[in-house]
Image (cartoon, rainbow, N blue to C red):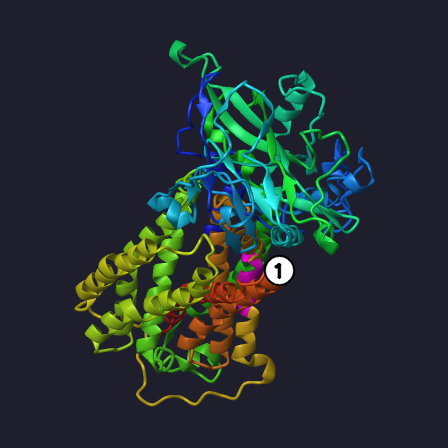
Amino acid sequence: MLNIIVVLLLFFSNNVIDSRYISYSKPNYYKTNDKIPVYVSICSYIIKSCSNSNSNSNSNSNNSNSNSNSNSNSNSNSNSNSNSNSNSNSNSNSNSNSNSNSNSNSNSNSNSNSNSNSNGSSMNNVRSGLSIYDYYKYPFPKPGTVEYKQSFMSKLAGDLNSTSLYDEVSLHTEVNCKELGKPINYTLDDVKKLKYLIDKHFRINFFIDDLPIGELFKNNKLVESDISSKSSEKSSSDTEEESSDTEKNHIYLGYPIGFIYNSKYYLYNHLRIFINASEVNTDSTSTTSDKGFFTIQSVNVEPYSCIDCKIDSGIGVEISPELFNDNKMMQLTIQYTYSIQTHETTTTNGKASQRWSIYYVNQFELSNIAIIMSFIIVLAVSACLAIILLKIFRKTNSKTYTQLSPDDGGWKSIYADVFRSPNNFMTFSIIIGFGVQIAASLFILMVFSVAGLTSIATPGGMAIASILIFSFTGIFNGYSSMRTYIMLGGTRKLYNSVITTTLIPFTILLLMFIGYFQVWSNKFTYGASIGTVFFILAMWLFVCVPCSLLSSYFVRTWPPAEYPVRTNPIPRFIPTAKWYQNQYLHMILGGAIPFVIIFTELSFFLSSWVLGEHYSYSLSFALTFILMIISIVETNMIFEYYQLSLENYNWWWRSLLGPMVTGLYTFIYFIYFGITRIETEGVGFYYFMFSLVFSILVSLFCSSIGFLGNLWFTKKIYSTLHFD
């Protein structure tokens, strides 16, 4: 039945509302001369690295040909870590070819993975992988007084808005060349800091009207505007292309700080900002009062290295440390500038529902392929299980036994031992309870995600939803643990209730707290504040713990679940199995199937968290979640039937530990991802601890699902044995 549901969801996936287009935050309306606020954000996406972002996104371009209009967009092969072969033709001159590694950092790596994860209304950020620092920590234009603004939701998201030097912008009012503060005098130490940022491929993000800026890609190619053209001069063919290829467009968030060309370092000091706005309610249903208003749909930028805004002069701003050799120069003075142009688009009719769509990586083609392959795997496993069930119920259900004959060996011969309680069933019940809590939380979060309630338009929405949902689902923890404990014959019910609600949650919180020590010591901006720590502890102590204790209290007097057959007081001898019948070998094989199904979603999740992409937890997440549950249950049932046929009746812990192997595979993949994608220092321990916690949660979730499936399966097949 579940397979049929998955097929229907997959078949109608193109017609299902996609939550990545749903935004419940109403956009601001502006008239032509209204001012648009610009803020600086010290958020979790401050300067960003794209060095290790190859090969994970659908925006990968193996042969991206970009024609550079200035020194800031030239030969991109010089010193890039990107795998894409970007062949760019530069119009600039030798040493001032300004996008050599700009396109290496910006084009190639932009092609590879839109890494930036800028949530919230903010403006300047500095990030490389998980190394995320305050923008004003580095020598960039800074106002005299920096004012920070941060709500509780933005704290959970790791965002911190602050004032900036960018003046408020007006729609349809172009700024050709404006200075960003006063010229900055760079010393040798400052230049070395900038050199480090360029070497590590940091990117700067900022936000206008709550929308992040970035470099625009169409069909996986970087869009570079004609320098001589005005923003308002847009041909009809461009508009048609924009309308028809909206799904293929993507804004790669942020822009690089500089680039390397011929072993020399150049700094981007001029930024062209393009504001894409659309008129509100331009259709026939518009009202008179709404006409004349505009909403900002997206903001994209083009960085340049130039002097006096002459972006086509072929002269770049060199900041190589070698300039300070032999005391030839004491300091280097650089002026930052920017220009602003407005594009009026007609593709969205001013609707806010598509306002964030261009900021998502186009992951859905890859997700659909992965889901189809996962469905084929689940279908094959389902066919094997169907054959087993058909064999059992057709040959056994109609018989009545007085005594089993020698021909009735295998799983039938151990009917009097199969429901013997396992050792350490207190620990067993605690694991089941917490695993069921995780499963319930994921299911509710999946529903919220598909409904669009965790859109990226609300920074911190996913974090607050996860905390609240997990806290209230503590009721499932206490209920499941107590019912399992009573079923296995436990009598220390109060002790079970207390340990269930404290042991594993406290261990998880302790591991996360230890991991955050590295974040706090390095002063990363996404480090949890004291208020956030107290909020999480309060939700656990005053919501999760009471819910778990109350549910345990109400079911403590319920009678235990009945078994279909009686248990002998004397255990039966278990035959010695051959090497290929080893239960641990079956655990390793069985845990691999669910991991294969969730592998693609794990890759997207890590790209979102580590590399900073926007990831859509919507239909693909829901389908993967359902397929994973089906694969865990069915795979566990098949291997369980095989072990019971070998007369090995110790299935309790086996049904729990087998699915846990999926968490082990997850941990190994997390470590591999961290080694190959994170190059900056100071985050290894935090990443390791987070990987460990995440893998433990996956293991507990899989184990509870596998056990519940095996419990139903074992009861069902032994209920077919009828004795006089």
Q: Amino acid at mark 1?
A: Glu
Q: Quadrant of the C terminus?
A: bottom left
Quarter holding residue 553: bottom left
For this view, does 279 lie left or right of residue 96?
Answer: left
Q: Compared to 278, does 45 lie above or below?
A: below
Quarter holding residue 14: top right
- Mark 1 Cα-neighbour bin, 10 Å: few <14, some 14–19, many ≥20: some
* Residue at the image position 49 percent from the left and 88 percent from the top: 575
Q: Residue furthest right?
A: 94
Q: How many marks?
A: 1
* Residue at the image position 67 percent from the left and 29 percent from the top: 309
Residue 267 spot, x, y in % from top left: 67, 43
Q: Compared to 221, does 552 lie above or below?
A: below
Q: Nearer the viewer, residue 314 or 701?
A: 314
Q: Which residue is mark 1?
A: 679
Quarter holding residue 551: bottom left
Residue 273 visible here: no
Q: Residue furthest top?
A: 288
Residue 511 spot, x, y in % from top left: 41, 68
Name the magenta segment's main secondary structure. helix
Q: Nearer the viewer, residue 619 or 224?
A: 224
Query: Magenta span has 668?
Result: no
Q: Nearer the viewer, residue 364 or 335?
A: 335
Residue 565 spot, x, y in % from top left: 32, 76
Residue 666 spot, x, y in % from top left: 53, 64
Q: Which residues are magenta?
A: 590-598
Q: Secondary structure at mark 1?
A: loop
Residue 353 visible here: yes
Query: Magenta span has 594?
Result: yes
* Residue at the image position 71 percent from the left and 25 percent from the top: 227
For this view, does 189 lie left or right of residue 700?
Answer: right
